[in-house]
Amino acid sequence: MAQPAMKPVGGTGPMLSIDKEVHDYGTITQGSNGDCEFTVTNTGDQPLIISQCQGSCGCTVPNCDTAPIKPGATSVIKVHYDSNRVGAINKSVTITSNATNAPSKVVTIKGTILASEGTSPVKEASPVAPVEKL
């Protein structure tokens, strides 16, 4: 949601500035909250329009407001990561906008997910199961 903010405005046209390039979850437990946020600021002198936010896979789901962001205002991009998979996280979100300085901006989420207590990591089933002979 676009919010007014007291940020210096400059530049020609809409300009995208983001609070962080990477969100590091650190080490979390399987099934933990996989939500994070990136704050976008329009540091330009024209409205910034985010036309799309795209996750690198189905487990990374971004939600961005497509309403114009006025010069000096901010908007929050919320990202949900499905933390039911065990192992390292290294996913990205591509933000597409009309920004003159960064029409396509990539941010990253990373971390490690450990198996919940009492569970074992999810493993893929073998396509060919061994056959027992009687």
Image (tube, grey):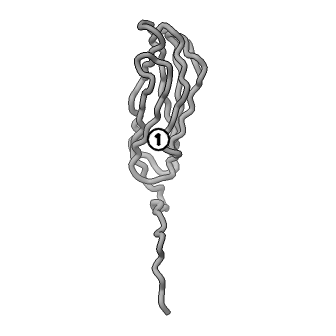
Is 48 left or right of 87, judged from the image as shown? right
Is 128 rendered above or below residue 63? below
The residue sitting at 48% across, 86% down in the picture is 132
Is 68 left or right of 19, judged from the image as shown? right
Is 110 rendered above or below residue 74? below
Q: Disc 1 marks which amino acid?
A: Ser
Is 13 rendered above or below residue 1? above
Labels in figure, total:
1
- Given residues 79 and 57, the one toward you in this image is 57
User: How far across and how far down the image is residue 70, in percent?
Assistant: 55, 11
The residue sitting at 52% across, 28% down in the picture is 77
Give the quarter of the image for residue 91.
top left
Q: Please name the residue that numbered disc 1 is placed on.
A: 56
Give the quarter of the image for residue 86.
bottom left
- Given residues 21 and 119, the one toward you in this image is 21
What residue occupies the far bottom of the structure in this picture? 134
- Given residues 56 and 22, the one toward you in this image is 56
Element assignment for label 1: loop
User: How far across and how far down the image is residue 131, in percent?
Assistant: 48, 83
Is 84 rendered above or below residue 118? above
